Amino acid sequence: MTLHPGVAPTARRQRTRNRLLGAAVTAFARNGIVSTPIEELCEEAGMTRGAFYSNFTSTDELVVNLIDCAVEHTIAGIRGVIATTEDTYSTDQATHTSDPSTRFINLRKSAKTAFTTQRLGWTTSVAWTITEAEIELYSIRNPDVRERYLELQNAQVRAVGVEVEQLLARHGARTTIPIQTAIRHLAATDIRTARQSIPPRAVELAPTPDASELVSHIMGKPGAAFDTSKLPEHSLLHPVERDLGPVLDLLSMMVEF
C-alpha cells in the first residue's frame, strides 16, 4: 500500500483533496474513522465517490494525509506565534532580574500568551481534538498508518522543540531535561486537558454537514488564520476552551535559569 506517493498534485486536484480532508475532520469527529463510510465523507465534502478514489487509494491514505496537514499547521502556527508575538515579559529588566519568583511569573505569562494565540488554528478545534484521538486508536490497529503517524509526530516534536527553546532563551531559561522529552510531556498534558474540556453533547448538537469548507480553504496554507466568527453555534470547529494551568505548571517545573 502506498500511503504517500511522490508525485505532487495539481492545484485543482489539491483543492479537491483539501475539501475531502476538511470534511474528514468533522465527519471522523462525529462518527469515528471506521464508522464513516466513504460515501458519507464525500457527501460532507460535496464530492463524488470517483473524486475520492482519484485522490486517495483508501481511507488509510486519507488519514495519513490528514495527519501530515495537522502537523504542518501546528508547526507553522507555533513558529508564527514565537516569531511575531510581542513578548512584553522578557524585556532586559525582566530577563536579568535576580528574583526567581519574578522570572517564573514572567515566563508563565510569556508562555500563556504564546499558547493562547496558537489556539486560533483549526488543529485546536473540538473536531480535531476528537479526530486526533480517533487517529491515535486507528493507528494502533493499522501498522502502515502507525509508522507514518509516529514519524510525523517525531518531526513535530523536533520542530516545536526548537521554537520553545527560543521562547525560553528570551528569559535566560532552559529545560532541566532534554527539550524533546519536555515537549512530549507538555503535549501529553495539553492533549489530556483538551479532551477533558470537550463540551458535553458536543457531537450530538453539531450540525450536519458542519462548516468543513472553512478548514478546506486553509488546508494548503499552514499557519493561515482560521476565522471562527461565522461558524454555527454548535459547530465542532470552534476551539476547545481548555485550562492552560496544568501545562504552565508543568513547564514551570521543567525549567531553570
Image (cartoon, rainbow, N blue to C red):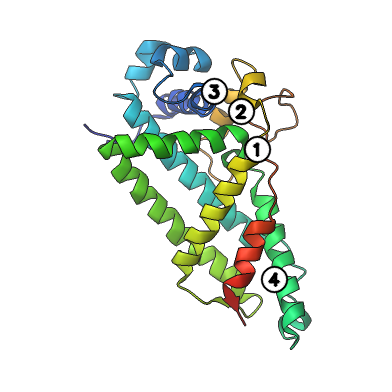
Spatial CA span between label 1 and label 2: 8 Å
* Cβ–Cβ under 8 Å for marks 1 and 2: yes
Label 2: which secondary element:
helix
Q: Residue furthest bottom?
A: 98
The residue depicted at 68 percent of the width and 54 percent of the height is 244
Secondary element at image label 3: helix
- Above or below residue 69? Residue 166 is below
Say which residue label 3 marks: 30
Left or right of residue 90: residue 203: left
Q: Which of marks 1 and 3 is nearer the N terminus?
A: 3
The residue that mark 1 highlights is 226
User: Please, what secondary structure does the residue beneath circle 4 have?
Assistant: helix
Instruction: Find numbered disc 1 in the image and state the secondary structure of the residue it sits on.
Output: loop
Q: What residue is disc 2 on?
A: 214
Q: Does the residue at mark 1 contact the one at mark 3 (Cβ under 8 Å)? A: no
Which residue is rendered at x = 70% and y = 59% of the image?
Answer: 112
Mark 1 → mark 3, Cα distance in angstroms: 21 Å
Count residues near mark 3 (Cα–Cα under 10 Å), then give few for <14, some for 14-19, many for 20+.
many
User: Rounded to the nearest whole Å, what is the CA distance between mark 2 and mark 4?
Assistant: 34 Å
The amino acid type found where label 2 is placed reads Leu
- Tag count: 4
Q: In this rendering, would 25 be left or right of 93?
A: left
Circle 3: residue type:
Arg
